Amino acid sequence: MGFYSKAAELFEQRRAFAVATVVRVEGSASAKPGSKALIDDCGKILLGWVGGGCAESAVRSEAVRAIRQEKPQLISLNMQDEVLGVGMPCGGMMDVYIEPVVPQPTLLIAGHGRLAEALAALGHLMNFSVTVHDPSADPAAFPTAERVLNKDLDLAEARIDARTFVVIATLHKNDHLWLEKALNSDAGYVALIASAHRSKLVLDYLRLEGMPEEKLQCVWAPAGLDLGAASAEEIALSIMSQIVMLRRGGSGQALRDRKAAVDADQSSAKSSIKEVRECEAPAAD
């Protein structure tokens, strides 16, 4: 299979990967400018070549980082120095451009009504591919959704993988059935919009039905962050805020408080360094 045919196959399968391209070589290096490799999100080279042991490990590691951050990177590898370079004195230097290819995340909303409509609108603004799945869903109420599936609990048409965020907004109607189906899929996020009392009832029911505890622990129920939300729009915002936080690796902490904590840590580190230097300073005669 050709390089670009393989890349197209990965894209069609909604698999995250990176294209690593050698753009400059100086001195001795096994790869040449234009050499390429396809690397998956676990750091495995699927196809191609960007050099041997001197460079491969570093490129694979940086490819994983680029995929996680969803940002391209240009890295320079010094293969002349065993200590300061990439670990082996093979000779030469090489620049590699790493471009991540990350599928658009999907927001799958089970349910209809004002809350589901607000959630779909916010998901579209956050660049999610939005699918609404509910027998009573009116396509006209979801103008930004890519698909509106007016069927019962048939997930065959609802494409679910690790980059799918499932939010159950059925408001108690068959929510336990939807939750069971979502937990038996490969969804990367599953949330139930319900009160704390209702959430406990649904989770306890599934627990009695034999759902493994480790799967139940993955459910965000009640869904969202504590924003003091009251309206449907505010609840939708709290849920999308949680999704963005988890997707981007955020803490949910106020930026002001986070900055204060970072400043305090830096101040403490500087004080420690000062104390060490004062202790190491030679005593005056």
Image (cartoon, grey):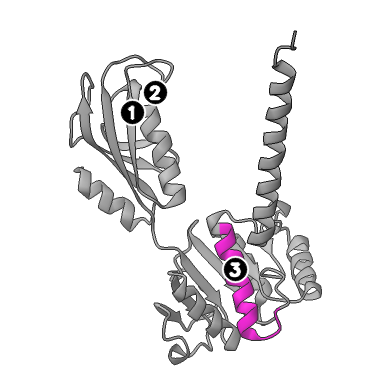
Q: Nearer the viewer, residue 114 or 261?
A: 261
Q: Which image quarter holds the N terminus?
A: top left
> Which contiguous range is marked in magenta?
229-246
* Outermost residue, right side: 197
Is residue 137 visible in the rendered image? The answer is: yes
Q: Are marks 3 and 1 in contact (CB under 8 Å)?
A: no
Residue that mark 3 sits on: 241
Mark 1 nearby-residue class (10 Å; few <14, some 14–19, many ≥20): some
Whether residues under marks 1 and 2 lie with C-beta atoms below 8 angstroms apart, the answer is yes
How far is disc 1 from disc 2 in space, using C-alphas?
A: 6 Å
Q: Residue at x 67, y 62 (%)?
A: 254
- Callout 3: helix, strand or loop? helix
Above/below status of 72 relative to 224: above
The residues tagged by marks 3 and 1 sit, at their Cα atoms, a distance apart of 38 Å
Q: Nearer the viewer, residue 41 or 178?
A: 41
Q: Residue at x 32, y 20 (%)?
A: 79
Q: Which residue bears the numbered disc 2?
A: 86
Residue shown at the point (38%, 56%) measured from the top left? 14
Residue 42: name its quadrant: top left
The spot of residue 177 in percent (x, y) is 64, 72
Query: Which residue lies under the disc numbered 1?
Result: 77
Where in the figure is residue 213, as x and y percent of width and height?
A: 73, 54
Query: Within 10 Å of the Cα at label 2, are there few (<14), some (14-19), or many (20+) other Cα atoms?
Result: many
Q: Which comes sooner in the sequence, label 3 or label 2?
A: 2
- Figure quadrant of residue 204: bottom right
Q: Amino acid at mark 3?
A: Ser
Residue 67 highlighted magenta (yes or no): no
Residue 65's place in the image compared with 236, above or below, is above
Q: Nearer the viewer, residue 222 or 244?
A: 244
Mark found first going from the N terminus, 3 or 1: 1
Answer with left or right where residue 245 lies relative to residue 144: right
Rendered image: mark on residue 91: none
